[in-house]
Image (cartoon, rainbow, N blue to C red):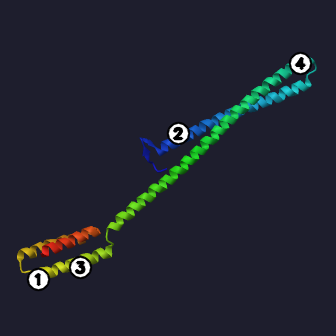
Amino acid sequence: MSGRTNLGITDEFMQSMRQERVNNLMGELETRTGHKDNLAKALAQARANYLNAETEAEKEQFQKVIDDLESKLEDATEQWQEVWIAALQANKEAYEATMQDIVDSFDDYADRIKLWDEANERYLEGYRQQYELAKLTRDISNSINDKDSIRAKKELQKLEDKIRGIKESGRQISEDELNLLQKEYELRLA
């Protein structure tokens, strides 16, 4: 599934443990089915022998065998049903856990998409970033030409170089970064 780890136990480990439990119960169910079938065959044979018995003593002996086999078959059937119910429950739990793992992995995926979208919303779209930076650069260039102070011109030139570096690097900037650049421009004008 998603490969998450909880307290050092991964989803894959838990899935293998659930599958191992199902496999063990299915193996036990197969063994108990064979035992139950063998008892049913032995009971059928004992009943046939009873019907073919020639003396009352033989019939009495086969009746004891039949009674014993019926009791054992009843016990074996109850044990088989218990294992069968446990196997069904284990399969159900494994299925539900697998489905929950799938749902959780989709939830994790949805959370990642949401975080990605939120992160992308913070950044200006490419054309808007180019427009805003070009506009700010034009305003700075006009201000440099309008200023008489060499010191003020150098400060504005540094800001213009900073913006040029951002444009040349192709780095995306956020709305907040753009606002900071604009505020820095306004401070240097003052």
> Which SS class for mark 3?
helix
Secondary structure at numbered mark 1 = helix
Residue designated by label 3: 135
Q: Nearer the viewer, mark 2 or mark 3?
A: 3
Residue at 25% across / 68% down in the picture? 177
Rendered image quadrant of residue 170: bottom left
Pick the front one: 175 or 59: 175
Mark 2: secondary structure:
helix
86 is higher (above) or lower (below) than 45: below
State which tag comes first along the sequence, 1 or 4: 4
Kind of residue at disc 1:
Asp
User: Which one is in front, 32 or 183?
Assistant: 183
Say which mark, if any, is on residue 58: 4
Tell me the tag on residue 14: none
Measure the alpha-carbon separation of dots 1 and 3: 17 Å
Position of 70 compared to 173: left or right? right
Q: Amino acid at mark 2?
A: Met
- Distance of label 2 from label 3 (alpha carbons): 63 Å
Instruction: Note whether 190 is above or below 119 in the view shown.
Output: below
Q: For mark 1, what is the residue?
A: 146
